[in-house]
Image (cartoon, coloured by chain):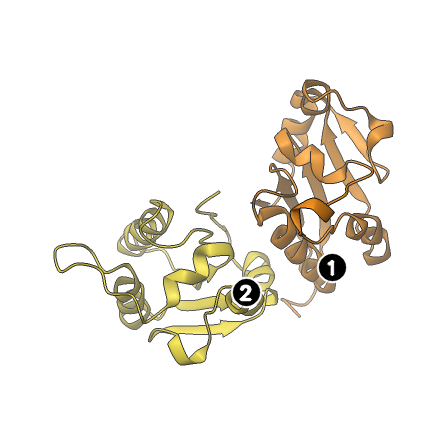
Chain colours: A yellow, B orange
Amino acid sequence: MVNEGPYQRQSSDSAYLFCKAALEAGHEIERVFFYHDGVNNATKLTEPPQDDRNVVARWAKLAQDHGVDLVVCVAAALRRGIVDQNLAQGFRISGLGQLVESAIQSDRMVVFGD
Amino acid sequence: MGEAGTVKKFLFVNRKAPYGSVYALEGLEVVLISAAFDQDVSLAFLDDGVYQLAKGQNTKAIETKNFSPTYRALEGYDIEKLYVERESLEARGLAEEDLLVDVKVLDAAQMAAMMDEMDVMISF
């Protein structure tokens, strides 16, 4: 669960690096759920400077390479102007039920951000 | 919904004041959704999170929705296990009778022991 947007805080970076390390260690990551300002990780309108990491593209690549389900909360997304039209590749918009379902089905759920 | 028969102990940990950030409001939305999954749900309130349950909230001047009545509606969702940390209350000059719902007050050690029993913890 990622609760902070990209760049302003490190939470999204930490979550991404944790996912990468967990996958490399042979764990399965079923889903990353983006909530609160975390939904801002899913905008395709982001254009970071060339010499900086591209947080959004990095998530998308993780989804593509490892089949991780990137889910953006619809209610939180609508509040913040994240809609299908500006949703980055690899993400999908769905409900909070997906978060609760993951918590039930997974061995562990890890929360990143305040 | 969910895997048939799987019931986990969920604890939603509320640590922030009700206004000033969206965490409390959006946190409550997760709590309400969780009720649809027939899980064993508890809520903990500590630090400034205890203010979420304070009686007499009036948000008119900050032009923000007063969502505190929702806490009283939790009972209708079969969410009845609300725990509040004693130290957090005392540090803020609050007592159990200042709260708008029935809660169980625990000290920090009891709170820690309760958290130890949980399967899933989500903090806001």
Residue at left offset 20%, top offset 56%:
A53
Report the side of A101 relative to A4 (left or right): right
Query: Do tags 2 and 1 sit on the same chain?
Result: no
Kind of residue at badge 1: Ala
Which of discs 2 and 1 lies nearer the camera? The answer is: 2
Percent of width and height locating residue A105: 56, 61
Q: Measured along the vertical axis of the image, is residue B20 above or below residue A44?
A: above
Label 1 CA crowd tier, 10 Å (few <14, some 14–19, many 20+): some
Q: Nearer the viewer, residue B124 or B108?
A: B124
Chain containing the residue with disc 2: A
Q: Measured along the vertical axis of the image, is residue A57 above or below residue B57?
A: below
* Whole-number angstrom distance, CA of label 2 to CA of label 1: 23 Å
Residue at left offset 33%, top offset 45%:
A10
Percent of width and height locating residue B33: 68, 62
Chain containing the residue with disc 1: B
Residue at left offset 38%, top offset 66%:
A42
Kind of residue at badge 2: Arg
Percent of width and height locating residue B113: 65, 28
Tell me the element at label 2: helix
Q: Which residue is mark 1?
A: B35
Tell me the element at label 1: helix
Residue at left offset 26%, top offset 54%:
A24
Percent of width and height locating residue B106: 74, 26
* Quarter of the rendering containing residue B47: top right
